[in-house]
Amino acid sequence: MGWVYNASPNVEAASQYPVVLGVCLSLTVLMVVTVGLRLFMRAQASRLGAADWVMVVSMLNYAGRPFYQIGIAGFKASLCLSYLRLLEGTSKSRYRILIWVVIVLCTIGHIVGALILIFNCTPVHKAWHPTEPGSCLPVGATFYGLAIFTIICDVVVIFLPIPLLLKLNIKPAQKAGVVCLFLLGLFTTICSILRLTQIHRVAFGDGNSTMLVLWGTIEFNVGVWTRHFLLPSIL
């Protein structure tokens, strides 16, 4: 059995699986190290919280296309839970409700996305046995719908804390720096958009999903790094 499942020798030979494996393995190792160091430092300081454990769940769910949806939901929920820490001891109850609404909507949406990817074919096993009789949801419409929802959630989650950060009682230079750091998190949105541009090739072109997989991998890992490198500056 080759690296490309259910493919002919010609497809196997033309596949860019070495690139996919190299990028995925290297970024996954960095992600595990990053999360591990973060958990260790938080444990040493007795500051482990819900956001940290949600990130662990997110990391463990980064196992394949369907569960990728749950993984990206996890790092967004982790970011939002960290925003709630900024509100501890304040009277901003409406802001807290807004953050919880974003958490619930994004999480439910991504879980639904995972279920759509798992059960998109009838029978289910037709997804990995395409020659089997049956039917599947249209690839283009399904992928575009999930990608657009992901991008919307990215933008909302990144900009959600900006009004709060602008009111922090810190020096103007520090405040500007913190806001800029959060805007760097928009790189995950850029990755989502670049992934979206590859859907047409997968659905209507030659079917090569190499760049789709790579941009999805980069998106997830950048999201994790954003959570662990940006938030320590204010939490």
Image (cartoon, rainbow, N blue to C red):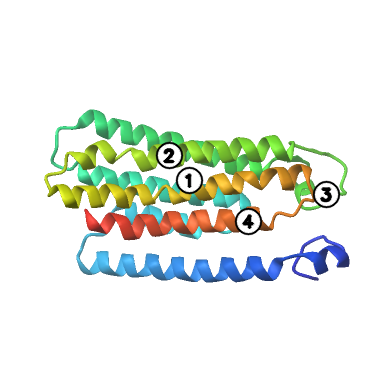
Mark seen at residue 189:
1
For residue 21, above or below residue 75: below
Question: Which label lies toward us, 4 or 3?
Answer: 4
Task: Answer with mark 3 or mark 1, whichever residue precedes in sequence.
Answer: 3
Mark pair 3, 2: CA separation:
35 Å
Give the residue at the far top of this rendering: 94
Q: Is the C-beta separation of discs 1 and 2 under 8 Å?
A: yes
Q: Amino acid at mark 2?
A: Val
- Tell me which corner region of the image, top left, top right, bottom left or bottom right, holds residue 56: bottom left
The image position of residue 24, as x and y in percent, is 58, 66
Q: Who's the residue at 87% across and 49% down the image?
A: 131
Closer to us: 107 or 223:
223
Question: Which label lies toward us, 4 or 1?
Answer: 1
The image position of residue 64, as x and y in percent, is 61, 56
Task: Answer with mark 4 or mark 2, whichever residue precedes in sequence.
Answer: 2
Mark seen at residue 130:
3
